[in-house]
Image (cartoon, rainbow, N blue to C red):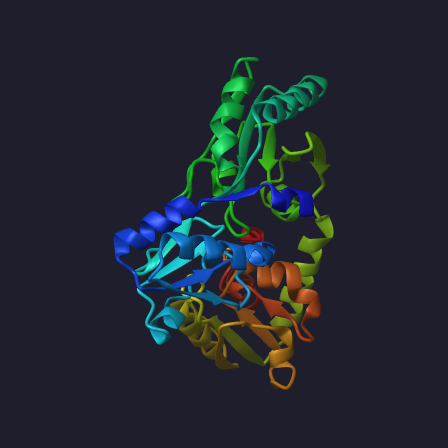
Protein backbone atom coordinates (compact mmCIF):
# COMPACT_ATOMS: atom_id res chain seq x y z
CA UNK A 1 0.00 0.00 0.00
CA UNK A 2 2.86 2.38 0.88
CA UNK A 3 4.41 1.60 -2.51
CA UNK A 4 1.06 2.26 -4.20
CA UNK A 5 0.64 5.62 -2.42
CA UNK A 6 4.06 6.74 -3.65
CA UNK A 7 2.79 6.15 -7.20
CA UNK A 8 -0.03 8.67 -6.79
CA UNK A 9 0.39 11.70 -8.99
CA UNK A 10 -1.07 14.94 -7.66
CA UNK A 11 -1.93 17.46 -10.35
CA UNK A 12 -0.30 20.54 -8.80
CA UNK A 13 -0.34 22.37 -12.14
CA UNK A 14 -4.14 22.02 -12.27
CA UNK A 15 -4.37 23.31 -8.67
CA UNK A 16 -2.22 26.31 -9.54
CA UNK A 17 -4.39 27.21 -12.55
CA UNK A 18 -7.54 26.99 -10.43
CA UNK A 19 -6.02 29.32 -7.82
CA UNK A 20 -5.15 31.83 -10.53
CA UNK A 21 -8.55 31.50 -12.18
CA UNK A 22 -10.29 32.25 -8.87
CA UNK A 23 -7.76 35.01 -8.12
CA UNK A 24 -7.65 33.43 -4.66
CA UNK A 25 -5.65 34.91 -1.81
CA UNK A 26 -6.62 32.34 0.83
CA UNK A 27 -6.89 28.68 -0.06
CA UNK A 28 -8.09 25.82 2.14
CA UNK A 29 -6.76 22.37 1.25
CA UNK A 30 -8.65 19.14 1.99
CA UNK A 31 -6.63 15.98 1.63
CA UNK A 32 -7.25 12.28 2.41
CA UNK A 33 -5.33 10.61 5.25
CA UNK A 34 -3.06 8.63 2.91
CA UNK A 35 -1.67 11.83 1.39
CA UNK A 36 -1.18 13.90 4.53
CA UNK A 37 2.54 13.05 4.62
CA UNK A 38 2.85 15.01 1.37
CA UNK A 39 0.96 18.10 2.47
CA UNK A 40 3.96 20.24 3.51
CA UNK A 41 5.84 19.58 0.27
CA UNK A 42 2.66 20.24 -1.73
CA UNK A 43 2.10 23.58 0.00
CA UNK A 44 5.77 24.53 -0.57
CA UNK A 45 5.41 23.68 -4.26
CA UNK A 46 2.18 25.66 -4.58
CA UNK A 47 3.69 28.56 -2.65
CA UNK A 48 6.53 28.81 -5.18
CA UNK A 49 4.00 29.23 -7.95
CA UNK A 50 1.47 31.35 -6.04
CA UNK A 51 3.63 33.54 -3.81
CA UNK A 52 1.00 35.85 -2.36
CA UNK A 53 -1.48 33.10 -1.46
CA UNK A 54 -1.98 31.93 2.14
CA UNK A 55 -2.58 28.16 2.35
CA UNK A 56 -4.47 26.37 5.13
CA UNK A 57 -4.87 22.61 5.51
CA UNK A 58 -8.09 21.16 6.95
CA UNK A 59 -6.91 18.47 9.37
CA UNK A 60 -10.24 16.72 10.06
CA UNK A 61 -10.42 13.26 8.46
CA UNK A 62 -11.55 13.41 4.84
CA UNK A 63 -13.74 10.39 4.14
CA UNK A 64 -15.02 11.02 0.65
CA UNK A 65 -16.19 13.30 -2.11
CA UNK A 66 -19.28 14.08 -0.01
CA UNK A 67 -17.16 15.74 2.64
CA UNK A 68 -16.75 19.43 1.76
CA UNK A 69 -15.08 22.03 3.98
CA UNK A 70 -16.99 25.06 2.75
CA UNK A 71 -18.23 26.07 6.22
CA UNK A 72 -14.64 26.03 7.47
CA UNK A 73 -13.57 27.96 4.37
CA UNK A 74 -16.13 30.64 5.29
CA UNK A 75 -14.74 30.89 8.83
CA UNK A 76 -11.18 31.48 7.64
CA UNK A 77 -12.40 33.64 4.76
CA UNK A 78 -10.88 31.38 2.10
CA UNK A 79 -11.73 32.17 -1.53
CA UNK A 80 -11.20 28.62 -2.69
CA UNK A 81 -11.16 25.04 -1.37
CA UNK A 82 -8.86 22.56 -3.11
CA UNK A 83 -10.22 19.06 -2.48
CA UNK A 84 -7.64 16.41 -3.36
CA UNK A 85 -8.19 12.77 -4.19
CA UNK A 86 -11.90 12.61 -5.05
CA UNK A 87 -14.09 13.79 -7.89
CA UNK A 88 -17.17 15.95 -7.74
CA UNK A 89 -20.45 14.32 -6.72
CA UNK A 90 -22.34 17.37 -5.48
CA UNK A 91 -22.60 20.95 -6.64
CA UNK A 92 -20.32 23.20 -4.63
CA UNK A 93 -19.70 26.93 -4.45
CA UNK A 94 -16.03 27.22 -3.62
CA UNK A 95 -14.64 23.70 -3.98
CA UNK A 96 -12.49 22.53 -6.85
CA UNK A 97 -11.54 18.84 -7.04
CA UNK A 98 -7.87 18.29 -7.84
CA UNK A 99 -7.13 15.02 -9.66
CA UNK A 100 -4.94 12.47 -7.91
CA UNK A 101 -4.32 9.42 -10.07
CA UNK A 102 -1.91 6.49 -10.15
CA UNK A 103 1.06 6.55 -12.49
CA UNK A 104 0.96 3.20 -14.21
CA UNK A 105 3.01 2.35 -17.29
CA UNK A 106 1.69 0.91 -20.56
CA UNK A 107 3.68 -2.26 -19.86
CA UNK A 108 2.09 -2.66 -16.43
CA UNK A 109 -1.38 -2.20 -17.90
CA UNK A 110 -0.69 -4.81 -20.59
CA UNK A 111 0.58 -7.28 -18.00
CA UNK A 112 -2.62 -6.94 -15.95
CA UNK A 113 -4.80 -7.21 -19.05
CA UNK A 114 -3.01 -10.45 -19.99
CA UNK A 115 -3.88 -11.83 -16.55
CA UNK A 116 -7.51 -10.76 -16.94
CA UNK A 117 -7.73 -12.46 -20.35
CA UNK A 118 -6.22 -15.64 -18.89
CA UNK A 119 -8.83 -15.57 -16.12
CA UNK A 120 -11.69 -14.99 -18.57
CA UNK A 121 -10.58 -17.84 -20.83
CA UNK A 122 -10.19 -20.22 -17.91
CA UNK A 123 -13.67 -19.35 -16.64
CA UNK A 124 -15.31 -19.15 -20.11
CA UNK A 125 -16.41 -15.54 -19.60
CA UNK A 126 -17.04 -13.25 -22.58
CA UNK A 127 -19.21 -10.41 -21.19
CA UNK A 128 -17.80 -8.23 -18.43
CA UNK A 129 -18.32 -4.84 -16.79
CA UNK A 130 -15.27 -2.87 -15.75
CA UNK A 131 -14.99 -0.01 -13.28
CA UNK A 132 -13.00 1.33 -10.41
CA UNK A 133 -12.12 4.18 -8.14
CA UNK A 134 -11.15 7.62 -9.36
CA UNK A 135 -7.38 7.01 -9.10
CA UNK A 136 -7.57 4.38 -11.85
CA UNK A 137 -9.95 6.17 -14.22
CA UNK A 138 -7.29 7.41 -16.71
CA UNK A 139 -6.60 3.78 -17.68
CA UNK A 140 -10.11 2.43 -18.10
CA UNK A 141 -10.56 3.18 -21.81
CA UNK A 142 -7.15 1.70 -22.70
CA UNK A 143 -8.00 -1.47 -20.76
CA UNK A 144 -11.35 -1.64 -22.50
CA UNK A 145 -9.72 -1.40 -25.95
CA UNK A 146 -7.19 -4.12 -25.15
CA UNK A 147 -9.92 -6.46 -23.92
CA UNK A 148 -12.22 -5.74 -26.86
CA UNK A 149 -9.42 -6.73 -29.24
CA UNK A 150 -9.83 -10.21 -27.76
CA UNK A 151 -13.55 -10.21 -28.65
CA UNK A 152 -14.68 -9.67 -25.08
CA UNK A 153 -17.82 -7.60 -24.57
CA UNK A 154 -16.76 -4.86 -22.18
CA UNK A 155 -19.37 -2.64 -20.51
CA UNK A 156 -18.57 0.68 -18.89
CA UNK A 157 -21.44 2.41 -17.08
CA UNK A 158 -22.09 6.01 -16.13
CA UNK A 159 -23.76 7.50 -13.05
CA UNK A 160 -24.57 11.15 -12.34
CA UNK A 161 -21.54 13.41 -12.05
CA UNK A 162 -19.14 10.46 -11.76
CA UNK A 163 -16.74 9.57 -14.55
CA UNK A 164 -17.48 6.63 -16.85
CA UNK A 165 -16.98 3.42 -14.87
CA UNK A 166 -16.29 5.22 -11.61
CA UNK A 167 -17.57 3.80 -8.34
CA UNK A 168 -17.73 5.10 -4.76
CA UNK A 169 -18.01 3.36 -1.42
CA UNK A 170 -21.75 4.13 -1.56
CA UNK A 171 -22.41 4.00 -5.28
CA UNK A 172 -21.63 1.12 -7.63
CA UNK A 173 -24.48 1.86 -10.05
CA UNK A 174 -22.10 2.10 -13.00
CA UNK A 175 -21.47 -1.65 -12.59
CA UNK A 176 -25.09 -2.70 -12.44
CA UNK A 177 -26.69 -1.66 -15.73
CA UNK A 178 -26.11 -4.83 -17.81
CA UNK A 179 -27.93 -7.81 -16.34
CA UNK A 180 -26.17 -10.17 -18.77
CA UNK A 181 -22.70 -9.29 -17.60
CA UNK A 182 -20.93 -12.36 -16.20
CA UNK A 183 -18.19 -10.69 -14.22
CA UNK A 184 -17.38 -7.34 -12.61
CA UNK A 185 -13.73 -6.37 -12.97
CA UNK A 186 -12.71 -3.72 -10.45
CA UNK A 187 -9.61 -1.56 -10.31
CA UNK A 188 -9.32 -0.34 -6.74
CA UNK A 189 -7.13 -0.42 -3.65
CA UNK A 190 -7.87 -3.14 -1.11
CA UNK A 191 -11.18 -4.98 -1.01
CA UNK A 192 -13.42 -2.25 0.43
CA UNK A 193 -15.21 -1.47 -2.85
CA UNK A 194 -14.94 -4.94 -4.37
CA UNK A 195 -16.57 -6.74 -1.42
CA UNK A 196 -19.40 -4.25 -1.48
CA UNK A 197 -19.84 -4.77 -5.24
CA UNK A 198 -19.92 -8.56 -4.78
CA UNK A 199 -22.57 -8.29 -2.08
CA UNK A 200 -24.82 -5.78 -3.81
CA UNK A 201 -24.53 -7.06 -7.38
CA UNK A 202 -24.61 -10.78 -6.52
CA UNK A 203 -22.24 -11.19 -9.48
CA UNK A 204 -18.82 -12.72 -9.67
CA UNK A 205 -16.22 -10.04 -8.91
CA UNK A 206 -12.47 -9.83 -9.36
CA UNK A 207 -10.30 -7.06 -8.04
CA UNK A 208 -7.27 -6.16 -10.13
CA UNK A 209 -4.13 -4.60 -8.70
CA UNK A 210 -2.80 -2.77 -11.76
CA UNK A 211 0.52 -1.90 -10.15
CA UNK A 212 1.46 -5.47 -9.26
CA UNK A 213 -0.58 -7.24 -11.97
CA UNK A 214 -2.47 -9.31 -9.41
CA UNK A 215 -6.02 -10.61 -9.66
CA UNK A 216 -8.13 -11.63 -6.71
CA UNK A 217 -11.53 -13.28 -6.68
CA UNK A 218 -13.79 -11.51 -4.20
CA UNK A 219 -16.32 -13.38 -2.13
CA UNK A 220 -19.28 -11.47 -0.71
CA UNK A 221 -19.71 -11.36 3.05
CA UNK A 222 -22.92 -13.43 3.14
CA UNK A 223 -23.14 -13.11 6.92
CA UNK A 224 -23.60 -9.36 6.61
CA UNK A 225 -27.14 -9.62 5.20
CA UNK A 226 -28.10 -12.01 8.02
CA UNK A 227 -26.69 -9.57 10.58
CA UNK A 228 -28.62 -6.70 9.02
CA UNK A 229 -31.86 -8.66 9.13
CA UNK A 230 -31.19 -9.47 12.79
CA UNK A 231 -30.79 -5.71 13.45
CA UNK A 232 -34.11 -5.01 11.69
CA UNK A 233 -35.83 -7.61 13.88
CA UNK A 234 -34.38 -6.03 17.03
CA UNK A 235 -35.58 -2.60 15.88
CA UNK A 236 -39.10 -3.94 15.37
CA UNK A 237 -39.35 -4.17 19.16
CA UNK A 238 -37.85 -0.72 19.78
CA UNK A 239 -40.01 1.95 21.41
CA UNK A 240 -37.58 4.86 20.98
CA UNK A 241 -35.39 5.83 18.02
CA UNK A 242 -32.42 8.19 17.74
CA UNK A 243 -32.24 9.59 14.22
CA UNK A 244 -28.81 10.74 13.08
CA UNK A 245 -28.27 13.65 10.70
CA UNK A 246 -24.75 14.24 9.41
CA UNK A 247 -23.95 17.92 8.81
CA UNK A 248 -21.37 17.18 6.10
CA UNK A 249 -22.79 18.78 2.96
CA UNK A 250 -22.87 15.64 0.85
CA UNK A 251 -24.45 13.51 3.59
CA UNK A 252 -26.90 16.05 5.00
CA UNK A 253 -30.39 14.61 4.68
CA UNK A 254 -32.69 16.50 7.04
CA UNK A 255 -35.85 15.93 4.98
CA UNK A 256 -35.41 12.18 5.22
CA UNK A 257 -34.67 12.41 8.95
CA UNK A 258 -37.89 14.37 9.59
CA UNK A 259 -39.83 11.93 7.40
CA UNK A 260 -38.48 8.97 9.42
CA UNK A 261 -39.29 10.77 12.69
CA UNK A 262 -42.91 11.23 11.58
CA UNK A 263 -43.05 7.60 10.47
CA UNK A 264 -41.81 6.43 13.89
CA UNK A 265 -44.27 8.71 15.72
CA UNK A 266 -47.17 7.56 13.56
CA UNK A 267 -46.56 4.08 15.04
CA UNK A 268 -46.96 5.51 18.57
CA UNK A 269 -43.19 5.37 19.25
CA UNK A 270 -40.74 8.08 20.25
CA UNK A 271 -38.10 9.65 17.99
CA UNK A 272 -35.27 12.12 18.67
CA UNK A 273 -33.07 13.95 16.16
CA UNK A 274 -29.28 14.20 16.57
CA UNK A 275 -26.95 16.28 14.40
CA UNK A 276 -23.18 16.06 14.08
CA UNK A 277 -20.31 16.31 11.64
CA UNK A 278 -18.73 13.06 12.80
CA UNK A 279 -21.23 10.46 13.96
CA UNK A 280 -19.02 8.24 16.08
CA UNK A 281 -20.52 5.48 18.26
CA UNK A 282 -18.80 6.78 21.40
CA UNK A 283 -20.72 10.07 21.13
CA UNK A 284 -23.98 8.15 21.59
CA UNK A 285 -23.03 5.96 24.55
CA UNK A 286 -25.21 7.81 27.06
CA UNK A 287 -28.19 8.36 24.77
CA UNK A 288 -31.22 6.60 26.12
CA UNK A 289 -32.99 5.17 23.06
CA UNK A 290 -33.57 1.58 21.93
CA UNK A 291 -32.00 1.95 18.50
CA UNK A 292 -30.46 4.42 16.07
CA UNK A 293 -31.20 5.29 12.46
CA UNK A 294 -28.50 6.82 10.26
CA UNK A 295 -29.50 9.12 7.41
CA UNK A 296 -25.80 9.69 6.59
CA UNK A 297 -23.16 7.66 4.71
CA UNK A 298 -24.54 4.12 4.23
CA UNK A 299 -21.16 2.66 5.18
CA UNK A 300 -21.64 3.77 8.81
CA UNK A 301 -24.30 1.10 9.16
CA UNK A 302 -22.73 -1.52 6.90
CA UNK A 303 -19.15 -1.42 8.15
CA UNK A 304 -19.35 -0.07 11.65
CA UNK A 305 -22.55 -1.43 13.19
CA UNK A 306 -20.43 -3.76 15.37
CA UNK A 307 -19.02 -0.73 17.19
CA UNK A 308 -22.47 0.50 18.25
CA UNK A 309 -23.87 -0.70 21.56
CA UNK A 310 -27.44 -0.59 20.21
CA UNK A 311 -28.79 -1.56 16.79
CA UNK A 312 -28.17 1.04 14.10
CA UNK A 313 -30.21 0.93 10.90
CA UNK A 314 -30.19 2.75 7.60
CA UNK A 315 -33.30 4.42 6.13
CA UNK A 316 -34.60 1.43 4.22
CA UNK A 317 -34.05 -0.90 7.16
CA UNK A 318 -36.04 1.25 9.59
CA UNK A 319 -38.88 1.40 7.08
CA UNK A 320 -38.94 -2.41 7.11
CA UNK A 321 -38.77 -2.48 10.92
CA UNK A 322 -41.77 -0.12 11.06
CA UNK A 323 -43.73 -2.20 8.55
CA UNK A 324 -43.73 0.57 5.91
CA UNK A 325 -41.70 -1.55 3.49
CA UNK A 326 -41.56 -5.30 2.94
CA UNK A 327 -38.53 -7.37 3.86
CA UNK A 328 -38.56 -8.88 0.33
CA UNK A 329 -37.77 -5.40 -1.03
CA UNK A 330 -34.63 -5.12 1.09
CA UNK A 331 -31.36 -4.18 -0.57
CA UNK A 332 -28.19 -3.05 1.18
CA UNK A 333 -28.16 0.37 -0.52
S1 LIG B 1 -21.29 8.91 1.56
FE1 LIG B 1 -19.74 7.57 2.46
S2 LIG B 1 -19.18 6.13 0.87
FE2 LIG B 1 -20.27 7.83 -0.12
S3 LIG B 1 -18.66 9.24 -0.79
FE3 LIG B 1 -19.29 9.88 1.26
S4 LIG B 1 -17.89 8.85 2.69
FE4 LIG B 1 -17.73 7.82 0.68
Relative image position of residue 16 (x, y in whole percent): 36, 50
Horizontal side of 253 relative to 93 (left or right) equals right
Relative to 124, does residue 282 appear above or below in the rendering?
Answer: below
* Nearer to me, 181 or 137: 137
Number of numbered callouts drawn: 0
Relative to 165, does residue 190 appear above or below in the rendering?
Answer: below
* Nearer to me, 118 or 41: 41
Q: In which quarter of the image is residue 209?
A: top right
Residue at left 69%, top 69%? 307
Relative image position of residue 86 (x, y in whole percent): 47, 50
Relative image position of residue 149 (x, y in whole percent): 53, 13
Residue at left 29%, top 52%? 20
Res. 273 in view: yes
Q: In which quarter of the image is residue 211?
A: top right
* Nearer to me, 22 or 211: 22
Relative image position of residue 226 (x, y in whole percent): 70, 56
Res. 1 in view: no
Relative to 26, does residue 116 appear above or below in the rendering?
Answer: above
Residue at left 66%, top 65%? 305
* Nearer to me, 97 or 259: 97
Amino acid sequence: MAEATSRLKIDIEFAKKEIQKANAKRVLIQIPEGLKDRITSMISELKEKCKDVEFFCAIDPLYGACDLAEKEAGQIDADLVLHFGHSQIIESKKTVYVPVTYEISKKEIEKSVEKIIEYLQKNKISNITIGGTIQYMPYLQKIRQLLEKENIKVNVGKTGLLKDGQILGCNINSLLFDSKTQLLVLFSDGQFHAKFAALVSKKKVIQVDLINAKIEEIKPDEKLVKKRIAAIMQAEKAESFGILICTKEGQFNIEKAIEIKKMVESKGKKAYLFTGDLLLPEYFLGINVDCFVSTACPRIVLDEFGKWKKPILNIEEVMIALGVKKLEEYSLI
